[in-house]
Amino acid sequence: MIDNKRYTEAKNYAQQSIAIFAGLGNYDNLGVAYHLSGDYEQAVTSYNKALSYGSMDFVYENLGQIYLANWQDPATEQFLNKALRLYPQDYKLLTYMAILKGAEGDNVDAKNDITKAVQFGSVPQFLYVAIMQHQSFELPIPTSPTPILIK
C-alpha cells in the first residue's frame, strides 16, 4: 500500500497488524504511512512507539528526517547524537547531522560528518560538494515547508 501511495489503506492495515502483534516493525510501518501522508506528529508518535519495542537504524533515520525540519531546536541535535551513538556508521544519520551542522554554520563539523557519510553510503553529490566547498545553498526538506539554508 505504501509503495502505491495508498497511505490511508496502509495505516488501516498497519493498525490491524498492531492489534494482532504490537511490535517494532508494525509501528514503523504505521509511522511510514503517516510520514508519507504528511502527518508528521502521528508519524513521530508511531516511530517512538516502535522504538519502545527495540532499536533499528531505519526508525532513527525516519525520525531524523522529521526532526531535521526543526533543526534549530536543540532536541534535534540531541536526537541525532543519540542515534549516531547507536549507529555510528549510518550514512543517512551522518548526512542529517552534516546538514544540521551546515545550517548552524559549523562547516568544520559538517565536513567531518559528510566525509564519514560518504564512506558508508551514497550521499547526493551536490550536497557533498557544497559542504566540502563551503558553498551556501538552500536544501528542501520533505518534512518542512521551508528549505534549510546551509551556510
Image: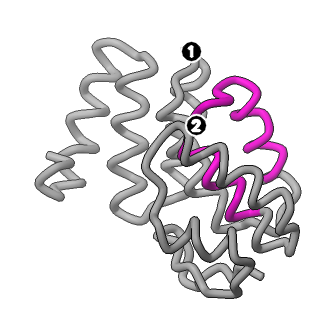
Q: Which mark is residue 54?
A: 1
- Image vertical order of residue 128 relative to residue 134, above or below: above
Residue 106 figure quarter: bottom right
- Image vertical order of residue 147 relative to residue 5, above or below: below
Identify which residue is drawn at 51% across, 34% down.
Answer: 59
- Is residue 78 part of the magenta span, yes or no? yes
Q: Which residues are magenta?
A: 77-100
In-front residue for pair 82/4: 82
Measuring from the top left, give residue 126's x and y in whole percent: 49, 74
Measuring from the top left, give residue 73's x and y in whole percent: 83, 63
Marks 1 and 2, how far apart at CA: 11 Å
Identify which residue is drawn at 32% across, 20% down.
Answer: 19
For the residue carrying disc 2, how many other residues have a C-alpha within 10 Å: few (<14), some (14-19), or many (20+)? many
Measuring from the top left, give residue 128's x and y in whole percent: 58, 65
Identify which residue is drawn at 57% across, 19% down.
Answer: 55
Q: Which mark is residue 60?
A: 2
In-front residue for pair 123/7: 123
Quarter of the figure with the C terminus: bottom right
Main SS of residues in magenta: helix
Secondary structure at numbered mark 2? helix
Amino acid on which disc 1 is placed: Gly
Q: Which mark is residue 114?
A: none
Q: Can you tell which of label 1 and label 2 is closer to the viewer?
A: 2
Amino acid on which disc 2 is placed: Tyr
Q: Earlier in the sequence, mark 1 or mark 2?
A: 1
- Image vertical order of residue 99 relative to residue 2, above or below: below
For the residue carrying disc 1, how many other residues have a C-alpha within 10 Å: few (<14), some (14-19), or many (20+)? few
Measuring from the top left, give residue 134's x and y in whole percent: 74, 78
Identify which residue is drawn at 73% across, 44% down.
Answer: 80
Residue 37 is left or right of residue 97, and the answer is: left
